[in-house]
Image (cartoon, rainbow, N blue to C red):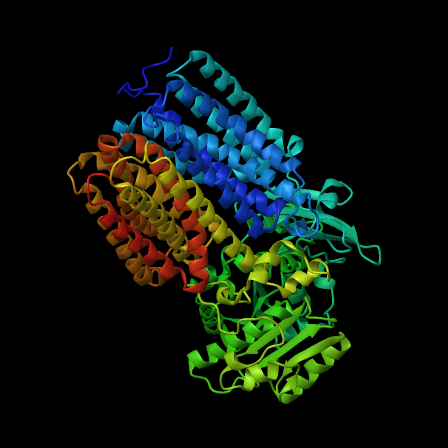
Amino acid sequence: MQADPSAPNCPRSTFPGLMLLSAATLLLEVCLTRVLSVSLWYHFAFMVVSTALFGLGFAGVALSLRRRPEEVSTRLLAWAAVGTPLAFVVGFGLFQIVPFEPFSLGKDGMQWLYLPLAYLAVTLPFFFAGTTIAGLLTRHAEFVHRLYRYDLLGAGLGSLAVIWLLPALGGSGTVVMAAALAAVGAAFVAAEHDRRLVYVSAVLAVLLGVSSLWAEVWLPVRISSNKVVAGGKPVGEVLADPQYHMHTAWNTLSRIDVVRFQDAAGRERRSVLIDAGTALTRLAHPERPIDKLGPTVSEESFFIRYFDSPEVLIVGSGGGREVLMALRNGAAKITGVEINPAINELLTDRMTDFTGGLAAHPKVEIVTDEARSYLRRQTRRWHIIECPHTISNAAMASGSLSLAENHLMTIEAFVDYYERLEDDGILIITRPEAHMARLFGTARALWDKLGRKDISDCVLSWKARSRGRAFYAGFALSKKPFAPEDVDRFRQVLKRRSLEVLYLPGGEGEVPYPKLISAADPTKVVLLYPAIVTPATDDAPFFNRRVPLGDISLRDMMGVFSPQAGGRMALEERPVAESALLVLLLETVFIGLLFIVLPLWIFRRRAMAGEGRLRTLGAFGLLGLAYIVVEVGFIQRFNLYLGRPVVVFATVLGVLLVASGLGAGFAKRFSHGRAATFACLVAGVAAAIAAGMAWLLLDWTLAWPAAARVALAALLLFPVGFVMGMPFPILVSRLQKTYPERIPWAWGVNGFASVVGSVGAVVLGMTLGFTAVLFVGVACYFVAALFSLGKTS
């Protein structure tokens, strides 16, 4: 039944098989990023998934180390393909069993055994998928343009499928469905070798597809014991207890869980846990009809009653607490903008009884949108814009938010808020005290940008009483100075609420906040805790980052996995996420060198024999870097423009991958000696032009309807994706004619570079901004063009 491994024909079943395997692999990759953010913290999920993706590169290197790497048998392909769906489920299941706790590596020696097991578990699926895909590209290299087209088209479909599958099946269900999809692909691939494996794959696909409907029950996501709720109880225990746990929903943004508990007075309260404790919001619960509730006395309601029937915008309205407070204190109209549709669904449908029909109140409008994108499309003004505190203790302690982009706290966001406020309007922000210094610095930068001189009478700031830095603090910025009598009234509210002053007009407050207001250069003020005072920007929107990457020491990096004696919350004092990112960058570079350069020299008598080895390495490595770096840059560039992350993801990633697939097929028309060089240059130029046009057009068209904005984004991205898909198959086709034994190794190089590029793009974005990221990607294409010169690359 086995065909001659050197046979030139490529069965028709190979193309749909490759497409389905590619779709399943990307679906798994995206889903794991979401699932592991629930299981672990975001930055550790990023580390684990990025390392797992090396499995694709390992596969290429493993194939290149065989005695005759250019010959891939149908037997190897069939068994690798059939093993792929099994590896999906086994690897994911093993990860749930292994009790890996990153924060315990410094105190529990067993964790050093669990660490490689956890990495192996998530790497296994990508190794099997990579072996199949690289094997197909090697065995049928003469059809590389068509194969690569189906590979990228499948990846595009996989990136779109997660949008619908994750909410419908949950995290575990989507992983199992990805395995079912891989089993269907395996059936097509195995058809070239053995019909019996086709039947096995088909049965496996049916079993996996059906079992995905209940995977959340039989294969639940394990949640780190370091994630705890109030009182120190592990989140995993709470969610496993039906006495507390009421509801779970997944989407591409997060997983949400509704939990109930009783307060000190015995009243039921409900909280929404986001990603199992990374953030938290509480559901509003009026105990009487809303219109019969009286006003409240608090530091936030003070600002509502500061006006006569104000209009209020709540940015990140979450569970509706601030919406209810505004209603109780006389607001005439409240608009709540929440990006997560699963949270809004609680207010508008699932838990309307508990929230007293808050979302249906005639004075309330709940909007599902990215707040900045929504705000820029509005012409109306509000008296108050409030950005309430929705961060959990657990998220702050883990440092998990430091890697999260936050367009709501950039200097451009402050300009948007200012322009949408009435002439006497007030911006209110509540955050942890650790973020206050940067808020003060951003407000100072706003006043400088607007040409305003004195900000000292326009700021109020406070915090909860705490032995250290408070988890809750507030900041209010008014367009007109606060009157002395209003400052006195606010001081009395703080006293009544047992809150402490950080800053009040007249210079009253805690060190260093009065200095941050009065100093000629606030960035020169000596702070009492690690913080960055310069404002975040839309180009580098990492507001929560408190330490420049260049200031992180080896001690910080070694302390990533070792909590201090002060307990989990002591991690607030350390740049955990930033250190984890640098550790990951070093890890990816080390692994890349180990598994690329080492085979280059040790096995040069085989696949690496002959001239042009470094040109092969450079060309394929730079193409991997260029593609992923440009992709990350465009996702960031279109984030605000398209608003909801699901739309950004579907548009940018989907269009780029599908267009690249079509470009790969079109590239077959070019076979002259300089085709690869020309394709790399055109890809770089196209990316640069699209980046420039996006810079000019996006602001001008932000008020367009959503469908029109998506269409414009697709129009800008499609030509870029089309030409970005051309260089790789042209280079593989040329390599097939000169050194076909290098093809699997080249695939491995490309895969390794993609992983390094994804990590490097985040590091570069944090330090120089995402415009620099885009143009580094462009530069990689130009340098790849140089490496592609010559016949041996």
Q: How many labels does the image show?
A: 0
Which quarter of the rendering shows the C terminus?
top left
Task: Name the residue rendered at 54%, 35% in the picture.
Answer: 174
Residue 109 position, x and y percent, is 69, 46
Name the residue: 45% across, 31% down: 129
Residue 58 vs residue 26, the one in the foreground: 58
The quarter holding residue 621 reads top left
Relative height, residue 790 to residue 107 (above, below)? above
Q: In this view, does 120 lie above or below 307?
A: above
**Viewer-nearest residue: 372 or 35:** 35
Residue furthest to the left in view is 672
Decide which of 31, 693 is in the foreground and name it: 31
- 459 or 515: nearer the eye? 515
Residue 633: x and y, percent? 38, 55
Q: Is residue 557 left or right of residue 550?
A: right
Q: Identify the residue at horizontal 42%, vertical 32% (top origin).
A: 62
Residue found farthest to the top: 1
Q: Can the viewer see residue 180 in this picture?
A: no
Classify 646 as above or below 162: below
The percent coordinates of residue 137 (x first, y second) are: 33, 30
Q: Pinpoint residue 279: horizontal percent, then vertical percent.
A: 63, 55
Q: What is the quadrant of the N terminus in the image? A: top left
Residue 535 in sight in this render: yes
